[in-house]
Amino acid sequence: MLEIICSRTNEFIQQMPKALRKKYGQFFTSKETARYMASLFCIPKNKSQISILDAGAGSGILSIALIERLSQETDAGLYLTCYENDPNIYTLLVSNLEECKKQIGERLSFEVRQTNYILSQRESFCRDVFADQKREQYDLIIGNPPYMKIAKEAPEAVAMSEVCHGAPNLYFLFAAMGVFNLKEGAEMVYIIPRSWTSGAYFEKFRKYLFSKTVLTHIHLFGSRKKVFEQESVLQETMIIKVCKTKKQPKTIKITTSPTNHDFHQCTSLDAPYPLVVSGRNQYVYLVTNNEDVALLNSIRGMTQTLPDLGFRMKTGLVVDFRTRESLRNKQEENAVPLIYSQHIRDGRVRFPGGKDNEYLVTDKRSLIQENKNYLFVKRFTAKEESRRLQCGIYLKRYLPDFKFISTQNKINFIDCMHEISECVIYGLYVLFNSTMYDLYYRILNGSTQVNSSEMNSVPVPSLNIIEQMGKELIRTKDLSENNCNQILHNHIS
């Protein structure tokens, strides 16, 4: 049954321009992924009828994969509700579900709602705090929601302001509404981007999610290129299963497959729940093996953060394409050095670097900063690079002729209200140039962007230990990752 549906879907993909499908944030699930997602549910027992929801159903691949399994494992009646407001695929979806009903028989009933899933329930969602019992709720919810950013003034964002910060992505609005539609004790399985697991941008969504549900299973893919391979999507994607309950499990199952075709080759880890869902911000730490667990436990043994020590990582001040008229290729009167990520080389900031627009002339105080000691960290790295955290030591004596400098916003910098000593800058470099902290950040954040708010939440040693490590690094004069690892090991093991 599913092979027929996927074949029809492939024909649709070939006929429909990608630009048109992108308008709806539409990316189709492979049959292997669909069957795997369907396999994750615990099928309700002793029910005469099972209700299923697939919001943003597309061609019905996920719905039919789940019905295929249910038809083999239960005699219950099956009632499926699908939402799909793309008129281009509506006919195909209905045709596929009718084909499915022919094979399953009368115990399958379905309804396709050609309307906006979020807006159709906005009034009920807003009344959720009053435990509105009139909402529609389901036994099983499965979904591959649209992946598309919308404006913060968009009707969907306004309708779900409780979970939004800034301009949201539709995928997590669908996930939040799915939680709203879950019956107590019921399960939802979604395939979504990984970006929600950390950062301030998704904090309201995580707060809502974990106030209503618990995570019971996470599936990760070794290759981001293979999840939606027909679509050339490079999004870091994951499958999650949540259960609507307040009872926190002892562990979360975390599985990993190389691609979306080889789920039989999964590795599996039962990770402690408080280790995975942790902290005031409820970040989700995606550990995949016992070494990750040990690393997390080791770093969690430190109880302070950069802000606790009086430091804060910030993002560079200048968006260069917005300040073109203020940029200069050469030094001139009143110009200040503008530090880019390209100036970070071999563990230090090396200026000038021989690139265009290395100087800034401005009277805006918000675009310049004191020339003092900093640790710079690149904000963006390539997915294939060996390190996510790439640091550069900057000392004010590197540019003694300048009272002020500036920073381009593709770098972060660690700042303090007061002057940071050179020893402390070197010590911070030991931390963030070590393998341990680089791996920690990869567990925390799957993107190629180093987020300053996340870095400010990372546990660090005491200021005294950081200073001692800095002195040792200065003495050895070796900025390599291996030397930083050895120094860190000497002080925190």
Image (tube, rainbow, N blue to C red):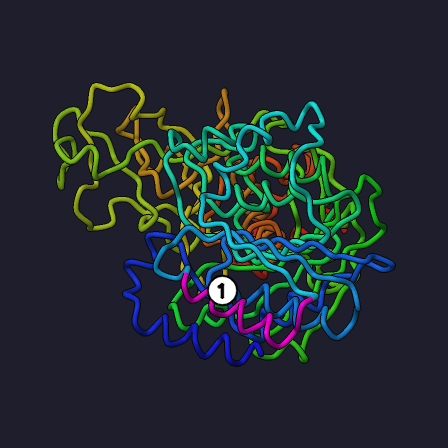
Q: How many numbered tags mark residues here?
A: 1
Figure check: 382 above or below 268: above
Residue sitting at x 51%, y 80%: 4
Residue at point 58% right, 46% down? 175
- The image shows residue 374, relative to residue 7, as above or below, that is above
Magenta stretch: includes residue 147: no
Q: Residue 350, how many percent across, how many down?
A: 32, 47
**229 or 122, which lies in front?**
122
Q: Quadrant of the N terminus?
A: bottom right
Q: Position of residue 243 (x, y in %)?
A: 75, 49
Q: Is residue 464 above or below residue 236?
A: above
Q: Residues within 10 Å of mark 1 (few under 14, many from 20)?
A: few
- Residue 92, magenta (yes or no): yes
Please give left or right for residue 373 compared with residue 190 in the image. left
Residue 484's spot in the image, x, y percent?
59, 54
Front residue of 89/276: it is 89
- Tell me which residue sits at (27%, 65%) in the image: 17
Residue at which label 1 appears: 386
Q: Which residues are magenta?
A: 91-106
